[in-house]
Amino acid sequence: MTKLLLSLHVLAAIVAIGPVTVAASMFPPAVRRAAAAAGDGPDPAALGTAALLHRICRVYAGVGLTVPLLGFATAAAMDVLGSGWLVTSIALTAAAAGVLVAFVLPRQDELLGLLNEARPVERAGTVRLAMFTGVFNLLWAVVTVLMIVRPGSTTGA
């Protein structure tokens, strides 16, 4: 059962978190391209791309809830719920989710709203969003490393 849970946990992380990290990273440049259109409002194709990237982030963020759920089930089956590396991973996962929910997704909504209203988008806003996205991605990278290295692991790696 542990191998099944671990496999599902890893697959969920790849399928759910991967698209969010990529789409969130692509969003700020897509908004800048859409906003760079001359006078007549945002470029429709670039606006469509930004909207699609935002939808990917929202949908896969919801799907991403399966990652910690399967992680807890796996950790319980492996009897490692109290391990320091796991507690640290849980805290970092919560921080990543907080950054996504509190900073990345709302800022994406705001920037899309500006584009849809044909209002100017300041570069500083997309740069700030890119910074929050980078923090989100970095937190997930650290969690991934902890999941692989696992201090005290018995895998022999």
Image (cartoon, helix red, strand yellow):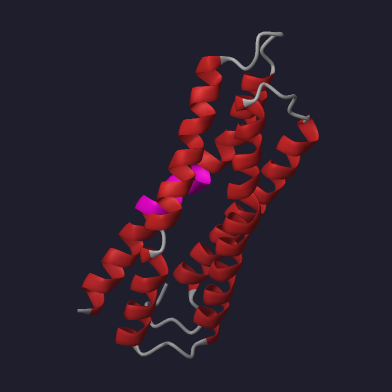
Which residue is located at x 32 percent, y 79 percent? 73
Image quadrant where residue 38 sits = top right
Front in this rendered view, residue 77 or 153: 77
- Position of 109 relative to 34 (above/below): below
Q: How many marks?
A: 0
Q: Is residue 156 left or right of residue 124?
A: left
Residue 146, x across and y down, in percent: 52, 70
Residue 17 in magenta stretch: yes
Q: Main secondary structure of the magenta part?
A: helix
Which residue is located at x 34 percent, y 86 percent? 76
In this picture, which residue range is highlighted in magenta?
Answer: 15-22
Give the position of the N terminus as an image quadrant.
Answer: bottom left
Which residue is located at x 61 percent, y 41 percent? 108
Which residue is located at x 67 percent, y 25 percent? 32
Image quadrant where residue 114 sits = top right
Front in this rendered view, residue 113 or 36: 113
